[in-house]
């Protein structure tokens, strides 16, 4: 569903991504792990066209997209949940969801408000509440729900567990597993190894803009030296 090959990207003259390659399939959750500043968010922004790809390929559902503008990439069915959420604070939950609506796709799960409220019961009780009067965890749920209103085939989740209370992190993990059961392709960036182990099938580790490991979560769990080298704080 999503294939990234030898991706390079810059911020000004700073070379941030150095030949990043990764892949994620439909019905699979893949974690992109790394410390702060390792390049995780830049990978996602480059996939979405928000950071220009200097070279390399991004292939989504068999189509090259690295030269497309972000709105065209979203229209093709690639959804992005940014780390900073970017909800509309003055709009209600229902209005935020309406902003994200796209037509149903024959090759992707179809989402309605009621289906999303089943996935995120917390939101069901606050349909008319403005986004600015919600907790961080509730805003994170709303951001994911708004993205799902676009009926994507693949979702990029940038740091979905960051700054959330443990009970909300557990709810988030259940939601990510539910997306997998729906057949979605999910690529998530994370520093939280425990969260990633609870939801992901495979993982990549990125450090200084380069992929240092790619394999199953079981392989990563069995390699303490790898975790110590690239993931310990």
Image (cartoon, rainbow, N blue to C red):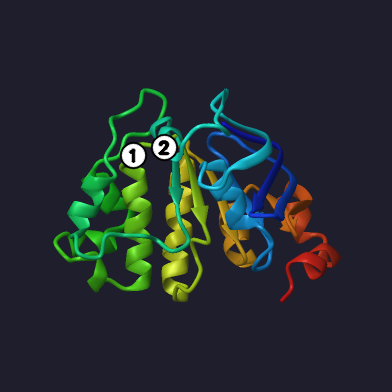
User: Element at badge 1?
Assistant: loop
Mark 2 is surrounded, within 10 Å at the Cα level, by few (under 14), some (14 to 19) or many (20 or more) other residues, namely some
- Mark 1 or mark 2, which has the lower sequence index? 2
Q: Please tell me in which quadrant of the rendered image residue 164 appears.
A: bottom left
Q: Is residue 129 left or right of residue 206?
A: left
Q: CA distance from mark 1 to mark 2?
A: 8 Å
Question: Looking at the rendered structure, which numbered label has been put on residue 150?
Answer: 1
Work out which residue is located at the far right of the displayed protein and give it. Answer: 225
Observer-nearest residue: 57 or 55? 55
Q: Quadrant of the C terminus?
A: bottom right
Q: Is residue 13 left or right of residue 73?
A: right
Q: Nearer the viewer, mark 1 or mark 2?
A: 2
Q: Decide: marks 1, 2 in contact (CB < 8 A)? A: yes
**Residue 5 image offset from top left, x and y in percent:** 71, 35
Residue reaching furthest front? 13
Q: Quadrant of residue 167?
A: bottom left
Q: Which of the pair 77/27 is nearer the observer? A: 77
Q: Give the answer, above or below, for where 26 lies relative to 116.
A: above
Q: Residue at x 25, y 61 (%)?
A: 123
Q: Which residue is mark 2?
A: 74
Quarter of the figure that contains the N terminus? top right
Number of residues whose C-alpha sits closer than 10 Å to that of mark 1, classed few (under 14), some (14–19) or many (20 or more): many
Provide residue 110's location: percent of width, then percent of height.
Answer: 32, 34
Residue 226 quadrant: bottom right
Name the residue: 46% across, 66% down.
170
Residue 196, image x, y percentages: 60, 59
Q: Secondary structure at mark 2?
A: helix
Answer left or right for 207 relative to 110. right
Q: Residue at x 47, y 52 (%)?
A: 176
Depth check, front residue: 183 or 127: 127
x, y percentage for residue 208?
75, 60
Q: Is residue 21 left or right of residue 112?
A: right
């Amino acid at each position: 569903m999503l294939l990234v090959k030898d991706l390079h990207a810059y911020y000004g003259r700073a070379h941030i991504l150095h030949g990043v390659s990764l892949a994620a399939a439909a019905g699979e959750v893949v974690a992109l792990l790394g410390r702060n500043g390792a390049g995780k968010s830049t990978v996602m922004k480059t996939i979405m066209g928000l950071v220009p790809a200097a070279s390399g390929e991004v292939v989504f559902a068999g189509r090259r997209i690295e030269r497309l503008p972000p709105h065209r990439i979203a229209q093709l069915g690639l959804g992005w949940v940014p780390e900073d959420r970017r909800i509309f604070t003055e709009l209600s939950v229902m209005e935020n969801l309406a902003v994200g609506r796209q037509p149903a796709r024959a090759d992707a799960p179809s989402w309605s408000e009621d289906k999303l409220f089943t996935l995120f019961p917390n939101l069901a009780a606050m349909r008319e509440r403005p986004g600015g009067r919600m907790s961080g965890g509730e805003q994170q749920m709303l951001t994911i729900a708004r993205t799902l209103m676009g009926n994507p085939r693949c979702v990029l989740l940038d740091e979905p567990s960051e700054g959330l209370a443990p009970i909300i992190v557990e709810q988030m993990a259940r939601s990510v597993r539910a997306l997998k059961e729906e057949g979605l392709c999910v690529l998530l960036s994370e520093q939280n190894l425990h969260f990633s182990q609870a939801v992901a099938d495979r993982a990549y580790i990125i450090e200084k803009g380069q992929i240092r490991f790619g394999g199953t979560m079981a392989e990563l769990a069995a390699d303490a030296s790898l975790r110590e080298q690239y993931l310990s704080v």
